[in-house]
Amino acid sequence: MSSITLETHADRSKMEVSEEVAIEIRGMNKWYGAFHVLRDIDLTVYQGERIVIAGPSGSGKSTLIRCINRLEEHQEGQIIVDGTELTSDLKNVDKVRSEVGMVFQHFNLFPHLTILENCTLAPIWVRKTPRKEAEEIAMHFLEKVKIPEQAHKYPGMLSGGQQQRVAIARSLCMRPRIMLFDEPTSALDPEMIKEVLETMVELAEEGMTMLCVTHEMGFAKEVANRVIFMDAGQIVEQNEPNEFFNNPQNERTKLFLSQIL
Amino acid sequence: MSDMSYVRSEMLPERAPPASSVGIVGWARQNLFNGVGNSILTVLALILLWIVVSRLVPWFFSPTWNSASLNECREIVGTGHGHGGGGACWGVIRDRWQQLLFGFYPEAERWRTVLAFALLFVALIPVLFNMISRRMNWVLLLAVLGLAALYLGGALGIIVGLALIAAAGFVGFKALSTSKEDRAAEIEAGAKRLPNPLIFSAIFPFVAPWLLWGGSIWLPIGAALGFVVGYIAFRYLTPIVGSLAGLIIAVLATVIWWLVLTGGFASIMSSIIPIGLEPVESRNFGGFMLSITIGVVAIACSLPIGIVLALGRQSDLLIVKALCVGFIEFIRGVPLITLLFVASTLLNIFMPPGTNFDIILRVLIMVTLFAAAYMAEVIRGGLAALPTGQYEAADALGLDYWKAQRLIIMPQALKISIPGIVSTFIGVFKDTVLVSIIGLLDPLGLTNAIRADVAWNGLVWELYGFIAFMFFVFCFSMSRYSMYLERRLRTDHR
């Protein structure tokens, strides 16, 4: 797989990791029917960390981050996000979801609403922000992802890269403390991957806690402070990026890296 | 294979297409005379069309409008083939059109049905279209009410009517004389806006039955108060007992109000302030007025019920799901006529003796439930067509189930289902003629009565043609409206 070279080099000095725990996963197991997708996951994410999760398809990496905002339910173990444990209590689930932003592979913008309405919907209906204020916040983030001029168009009129940047802006409008990225660039043309990655780099430089499932190893080297490699539903290896790419330990990791780099 | 390399030195300019492929000639070549077989078919179709039109037009334009009986028609157009001779016998329509429209509704009270029909449009416009302004909606309402008052006459009627029409003219003049942008600027600057015309759309369901059935005005007001009671209960109990319990109590309060207290409220109030219209009994309802009443109620109620059923069918709650599936499958598995027979005869057996459960009300409930079951399946199709990503995105933003349904899922699912929904509407409207089987006098039921008259005995085409035409007007309008709506809601263009 070819990875895109980023033009802007991320400024690592800006990206500090605090001692504060953002996400705590302990002994988590998940099954789809009888199929054991996630096995004994233990993971602690600190505030300000940028974690890239890599692994072959079917290894459970998407499922893992979808468990963090309970788009998937886990059956065993604990997931504590920002001090709130995810259980079947819907109030906690909604609280966590409004604190955690998510960006999907296929953008999942709402096609019947304009870009601006996509961005203001959740702040207005979940956060009860007055419409005017929500629109100002939305325009602020649309400017940040560099598409304020598209605000009154519909998603179907935008390119894939633009749509994904709108999706990022839409999540940011909820002022999340944590962002989850589920293969944000996998459905994009190479030319558009770069604009989305650059937006993500900027976000990292502002100290956002990020978990990214991605195949963009260039992004991992440049931005991540930790790379997690998963296979067959378990965390096989994790390390800081330099060590991970130059000195992998597990055979499975070595094989994977030899195939994609 | 000597040299594969090629470099274009200049880009080609755009050229106009060849003349034979554009314009009328191009269109005809492509669509009418595209090959020998198609040319033959085109010519044959034109000949057939000519034969039909050349027979139909003389039949249609026959000078029989003023004839008083079929025999008189025959004297005018002569006897030829067919019942009316060489031409149509339109006298029957002139003689009986009022009956076809109103059934046996008392003549002096017919203005009420016309007013209800006109108000139906005033109520529907803000719901169906967004092309006329808020102020024009109020102009329409004032004008309709003013005309009704003028028609009723009397000194009071004329004064009120003129006042209303003057008010309509004033608001209308102001609305037309200020442009959209100026108005927007005025509102920005704090000008008072007229109330939302949807307020009238919400009142109309209470006004219309009162106009049609008459009786004391306090009954529809009491019925409307039921919703107020429910709302108050919901508003003030929810913080105390939680939203689900609050909702259940609110619904119970509303139902109790309707079943137990409304009657008392209405009779007390009408003994204090007696305002009312001459009551008209359901058995006098008939003609298109009956069809439209049943059709409009069934259409308006089946959509929300269908949405709830479709959501229930997709629910994770086992009992809710089982109830919805059971209801839908049962209703869809039974012919409408069976349900109508149940409404007309069987229900009486279960009612306590002496209960007067209005026959039209019973039919309305049955037709609505029937339409709702079909509607639920149409909407389920729309829901199934939505990518799961939409649900996930709504969830991930922290929207709860009802907000996600209302803001994200339903707008899209309904948009996808528009053709199916409107087909169901049209089907329901046409199915209203089935009520003639249980003795209600819809237009088809009335044709039998008209043809039993000695003067018109033997007429078929003119009556059924007229009824078909009327139905066509309504159904075709609905079909065109659905196409308009699809165009308006199309946002996926690139």
Image (cartoon, coloured by chain):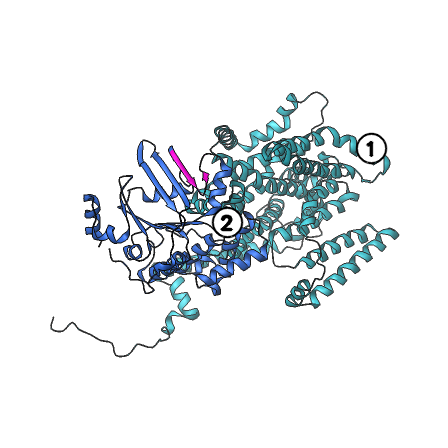
Chain colours: A blue, B cyan
Return the chain for callout 1.
Answer: B
| Of A97 and A189, the residue lying toward us | A97
Question: Magenta segment range?
Answer: A77-88
In the picture, measured across the screen, residue B489 lies left or right of residue B30, that is right
Q: Residue furthest toward the front?
A: A19
Q: Position of residue B99 (x, y in %)?
A: 71, 43
Of the two numbered discs 2 and 1 on the same chain, state the one appearing first in sequence.
Answer: 1
Check residue B268 in the rendering and tell me which mark sits there, or answer none: 1
Quadrant placement of the C terminus of chain B: bottom left
Name the kind of residue labelled 1 in the image.
Answer: Ile
Between marks 2 and 1, how big is the CA–CA gap?
47 Å
Residue at the (36%, 73%) spot, across then down? B18
- Number of other residues with Cα within 10 Å of mark 1, as a class: few under 14, some 14 to 19, many 20 or more: few
Name the kind of residue labelled 2 in the image.
Answer: Lys
Return the chain for callout 2.
Answer: B
Residue at the (66%, 50%) spot, across then down? B198
Q: Are marks 2 and 1 on the same chain?
A: yes
Number of marks in the image?
2
| Of A257 and B328, the residue lying toward us | A257
